[in-house]
Image: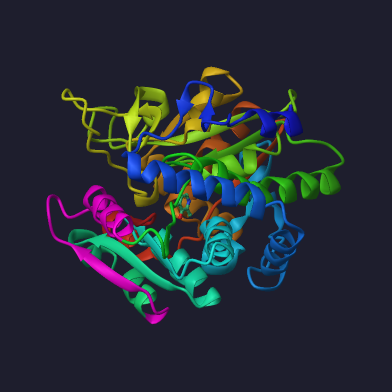
Amino acid sequence: MSENYFKTYPNEEGYFGNYGGAFLPPHLEAEMKKITNAYYSISKSHKFISELRSIRKHYQGRPTPVYYSGRLSNKYGGRIYLKREDLNHTGAHKLNHCMGEALLAKYMGKTKLIAETGAGQHGVALATAAAYFGLECEIHMGEVDIKKEHPNVVRMEILGAKVVPVSHGLKTLKEAVDSAFDAYVQDFDNSLYCIGSVVGPHPFPMMVRDFQRVVGVEAREQFMEMTGELPDKVVACVGGGSNAMGLFSAFLDDDECEIYGVEPAGRSLNLGEHAATMTLGKPGVIHGFKCYTLMDENGEPAPVYSVASGLDYPGVGPEHSMLKDLKKVKYDYINDKETIDAFYELSRMEGIIPALESAHAVAYAIKLAQKFPRQSILVNLSGRGDKDIDFVVDTFGLPENPK
Ligand SMILES: *Cc1c(COP(=O)(O)O)cnc(C)c1O
């Protein structure tokens, strides 16, 4: 499947099976074609590849290790391994695609990066990439999120990015997307819109996946070197799906590996209280592409929720949507409570505080380990949890003193 797979998906029009594409106003269609063509030629050039490789090694600190989680495995059964993306510079996998997108912007002669951010994680990663390349950076963020995510706002400002507050509607991610898009439309000659996951119109789901493939390529090789075999199970959390696509892409060819994508079941499975797009949603068009979506009764993107703000998106990458239909990947969910338990469990059993997003994958791996005590499980630990510590302790208390 692999080389062939990457040649087959997406097709010329940006489709992964029935999903993806680019549903855009005509004036932007031409610009997206330009980006697609630039990406196809630039990303194959020796210069681009070696510059990105050097950044990965000397700036980001790659390869990140694969770690055998011995105490956790002894307690729950199975053999649990963690791909340590929390040790990537800035503490999560997001910098993998932000550095790629920013390098592409530089090669295309763009001077400015534009994006929206919800919790601020994508904004911080992009501001980091912009600082590295000496590009301008404009991050649109809802006023509600600006108040909630103060440390990330300060980080972006320290890094030299301009944070544009968005004050209409619910003042959160959806409005920030509209605002960033408007700003981009007015200045697309000089700027590149940098999407934060494997979502949006073609070519973004493909580009972001390709930039994240480094996670899977490294992890597969490291795991083989450590154990002499392939993992029985591969697990990652799915918001838009970039960290998961990065890891999964290296194992799509291996029929003996079972692959699991873990979505947030939030507080309950009632609409508005979760973001389990793949398991509970239906195909539809959102933000310029087709995928599984959570819609309200009017066909508008539904409100979504998760304790992990990086996972609460009412759509999902088109490639995941296809992999679900092909039954190549199993999608399942983990709720808030199981996530918080896993957050503390990994912290206390291994000395690793996971991001709440990643804690969804850890919680699922623990369940699998109990069910399949003889098998090996490779988990993508997509990020570190420093950003979540105050929220978790203030909201849920410590395990010995719960709220
Ligand atoms: C943003 C984020 C995610 C979710 O994004 P994907 O595109 O689904 O990977 C997961 N983990 C961490 C640490 C994040 O910051």
Q: Is residue 158 left or right of residue 251?
A: left
> Residue shown at 37%/30% (left/top)?
277
- Provide residue 195's location: percent of width, then percent of height: 43, 51
Left or right relative to 175: residue 80? right
Q: Is residue 353 above or below residue 248?
A: below
> From which residue to which does the magenta span run?
158-186
Image quarter for residue 249? top right
Residue 365 point in image, percent of width and height: 57, 38
Q: Using residue 391 as the reference point, say whether residue 113 is left or right of it.
A: right
Q: Position of residue 40 (x, y in %)?
A: 63, 47
Residue shown at 37%/74% (left/top)?
161
Q: Which quadrant would residue 377 be assigned to in this image?
A: top right
Q: Is residue 109 left or right of residue 172?
A: right
Image coordinates of residue 96 in percent, x first then y, are 58, 58
Q: Nearer the viewer, residue 106 or 327?
A: 106
298 shown above or below 396: above
Q: Reply above or below: 225 against 9.
A: below
Q: Nearer the viewer, residue 9 or 23?
A: 23
Can the viewer see residue 338 in this picture? yes
Residue at image coords 70%, 54%: 67
Q: Is residue 164 magenta?
A: yes
Display coloring:
rainbow
